[in-house]
Amino acid sequence: MTEFTDSTAESFSPDVTTVRNDKFHRYELLVDGEVAVISQFMDKPGHIDFLHTETRPKFKGRGLAKVLAHFALDDVVASGKRIIPHCPFIAAYLRKHEGYELDVDWPPEPPVGEPDNE
């Protein structure tokens, strides 16, 4: 008798979780319980001001920061607050992805820094 099964190596994907961590004022993306990407913010009346997004070196190149940006921005919009993108990565994400235009208050000075955080 022959048994056919799928290879677990081909179908395995890590456990990815996204959360808003108010204690540390950041959104987090965890891979198998380990913090892989963070996006720091300041919670202001009526606004969430994104300050910095960072991917830990061993998780770079997987597109995880984009996943976190999407989650965080959708969370802000769902809360009824507006987005202030001081973070260069979040600003670049907003410029490339439609649907947030009516929810963004661009800062007077463009964000400074390297937007590529992948």
Image (cartoon, helix red, strand yellow):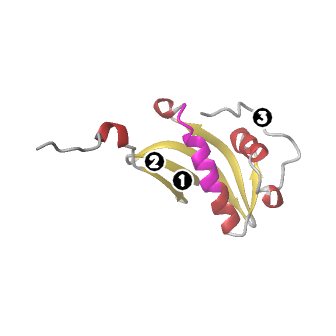
Range of residues picked out in magenta = 61-72
Q: Looking at this rendering, what residue extends furthest in the right direction? A: 108
In this rendering, position of residue 32 left or right of residue 46: left
Q: Which residue is drawn at 62% across and 34% down?
A: 117
Whole-percent x, y for residue 5 in the image:
24, 44
**Mark 1 or 3, closer to the camera:** 3
Whole-percent x, y for residue 22 in the image:
55, 60
24 shown above or below 34: below
Kindly identify which residue carries mark 1.
Answer: 24
Kindly identify which residue carries mark 3.
Answer: 112
Kindly identify which residue carries mark 2.
Answer: 30
What distance separates the C-alpha of mark 1 from that of mark 2? 15 Å
Q: Which residue is drawn at 71% across and 34% down?
A: 115
Dot 1 or dot 2: first in sequence order is 1
Secondary structure under the numbered disc 2 in the rendered image: strand
User: In which image quadrant can residue 105 be found?
Assistant: bottom right
Q: Which residue is drawn at 75% across and 67% down?
A: 46
Whole-percent x, y for residue 12 in the image:
35, 42
Dot 2 or dot 3: first in sequence order is 2
